Image (cartoon, rainbow, N blue to C red):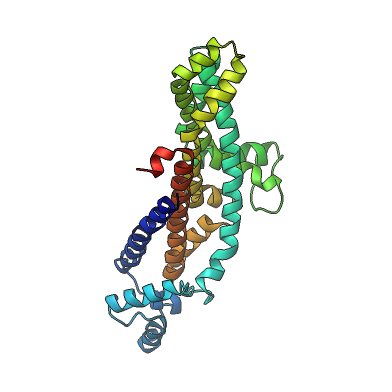
Amino acid sequence: MGSFIWQRIVGSIPVLFLVVTLVFFAFQLIPGDPARMLLGPEATQETVDRMRQELGLDKPVLVQYVNYLQRLVQGDLGKSIFTRRTVVVEMAAPFVNTFYLAIAAIIAATIPGIVLGTIAAVKQGTLWDHLASVFALLGISIPVFWLALLMMYLFSVQLKWLPSTGNQTAAHYIMPTITLATFSLAFIARMTRSSLLEVIRQDYVRTARAKGLPERVVVGYHALRNALVPVLIVVGLRFGYMLGGAVVAEQVFAWPGLGRLLISAVNQRDIPLIQGILLLFAGSFVVVNMIVDLFYGFLDPQIRYR
């Protein structure tokens, strides 16, 4: 198991290095001078040149890249061009807000998704199965921004039950959580149904039924716990997507998270901050994938001994 963990950790390093390289050179292709944007069109060329020197933009691209890697190794993501605060400080509070929202959303997606998928599998071919399938299809098909605007109009504007923006109270979590969880809930429900149907057909499940065990014991103890192994892997991956994919929900509900901060940084062309956010998104997803691999190896010995 120790060797398996070490292989996964070492294997994630080239991925992170590739992400860092792509992020850096992608921004070199974007037209425009960050120093000129920071100082405004009325600044003299001499002032702009001094600012470029201060930001390190006057050096060759490869030298900038090496310096960038050296700073990353030291945990330095640079400074925001507009606020002049470090990127780490700028991202700290928004990351916590996005993390809390992602936790709430994955819980709201996982529990109902597993219950819905289990009912659909146990009641295969019945009305319950068809209703669950329709719900899952709608959940996967509905665009996030449309669902967010619809909920805001209904529950905030018309009924005035829920606050529409911010994150001050628990009530502020409801609509962003549902918006972010809907697709994952539908996906988990479909995954649970297909996995459970496959497990129910196994010999050991038929043997459990032949022994006269109650159906709830056969399904809940023998079948479901084995069917949930691939489902839990999907849950981990969906959590990684939520950390980096909450941009739309955060923007619609004015949630002070990384997604909203990224939109603001893009509008201001704050390149160091944009790079930092993208690296944090990518790093979070790589870490979550690594944890998922480790968890899968722990549950299935065949994986870690290959």
In the image shown, does 196 or 93 lie closer to the viewer? 196
Residue 48, compared with residue 230, is above or below; it is below
Where does residue 159 sit, x and y in percent of width and height?
70, 36
Residue 130, compared with residue 251, is above or below; it is above
Q: Is residue 144 visible?
A: yes
Q: Residue at x 49, y 14 (%)?
A: 206
- 20 with respect to 228 (left or right): left
Q: Residue at x 71, y 40 (%)?
A: 160
Where does residue 199 sit, x and y in percent of width and height?
46, 23
Where does residue 143 sit, x and y in percent of width and height?
47, 38
Q: Residue at x 52, y 20 (%)?
A: 120
- 143 with respect to 65 (left or right): right
Residue 249, compared with residue 196, is above or below; it is below
- Quadrant for the C terminus, please: top left
- 286 with respect to 106 (left or right): left
Where does residue 95 sit, x and y in percent of width and height?
56, 59
Q: How many marks?
A: 0
Residue 129, compared with residue 46, is above or below; it is above
Q: Quadrant of residue 18?
A: bottom left
- 30 with respect to 169 (left or right): left
Q: Is residue 130 visible?
A: no
Q: Residue at x 47, y 40 (%)?
A: 233
Q: Quadrant of residue 113?
A: top right
